Amino acid sequence: MVDSDFVQQDFQRRLREIPPQGMGLSVDVYSPDLFELVNKLQEQGLQPGYLEVFKASTTALTTVRQAVPEMSLAYHGEGLWITQPDVQETPFFQQDVGEMVTQLNSIQSLWLNHECAMKQMAGYSFGTYVPPLYTRLSAE
């Protein structure tokens, strides 16, 4: 059995290595034009602490990284339900995880945002974006 103090200390150690992101802006790479948006913000003297970019092609994400090299980028793994109990049994899980790692690296992201739970009601799907609690109780 893993010592919970060790897990907590290890988590805190790794967390300290991630610089604070500040106030961010969640954006789509394609629409509205991301580069025009960033330029308009800068013209107004506004600069988000980071951009949370949604899943896109790796080429598009690499272009974003090159266009704003000084800005922190967080990655939103759209549709990547890694906290769902049966996720490893889904047909494209390994492929999706591989793509996620490639895209995280392409934008040099220190952070991955993902949906934590999904519910389907009356033909609609709803995602929950609250961070999961990585504790012994939640694992059990």
Image (cartoon, rainbow, N blue to C red):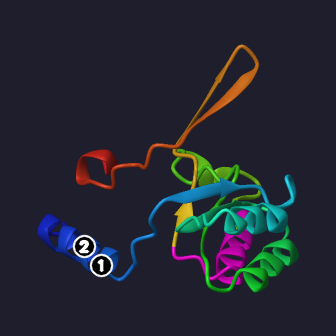
Q: Which residues are magenta?
A: 95-110
Residue closest to the eye, 31 or 105: 31
User: Going by the image, does 32 lie left or right of 10?
Assistant: right
Task: Report the number of numbered marks.
Answer: 2
> Which residue ends up furthest to the top in the rendered image?
122
Q: Above or below — where is 108 with respect to 120?
A: below
User: What percent of the width, then of the height, locates residue 126?
Assistant: 64, 30
Look at label 1 and name its amino acid.
Arg
Tag 2, which secondary structure?
helix
Question: Going by the image, does 74 lie left or right of 20?
Answer: right
Is any part of residue 75 visible from this angle?
no
Examine the structure image and report whether residue 104 is included in the region drawn in magenta.
yes
Above or below, comparing residue 108 to residue 36 in the picture = below
Where is residue 133 drawn, in percent x and y? 34, 50
Q: Mark 2: few, some, or many residues within 10 Å (few <14, many ≥20)?
A: few
Task: Point out residue 50 in the picture as x, y percentages from the top left corner.
Answer: 57, 68
Task: Decide whether the magenta segment is chiefly helix, strand or loop.
Answer: helix
Q: Which mark is residue 24?
A: none
Pick whichever, 76 or 70, lies toward us.
Answer: 70
Q: Residue at x 40, y 49 (%)?
A: 132
- Residue 54 position in % (x across, y down): 72, 58
Q: Which quarter of the rendering shows the N terminus? A: bottom left
Dots 1, 2 in contact, CB < 8 A: yes
Q: Nearer the viewer, mark 1 or mark 2?
A: 1
Checking the image for residue 16, the label placed there is 1
Q: What residue is shown at x 87% (from left), y 59% (from top)? A: 33
| Secondary-structure class at tag 1 | helix
Q: What residue did someone put label 2 on?
A: 12
Measure how far apart labels 1 and 2 are at the Cα level. 6 Å
Q: Is residue 13 above or below residue 24?
A: below
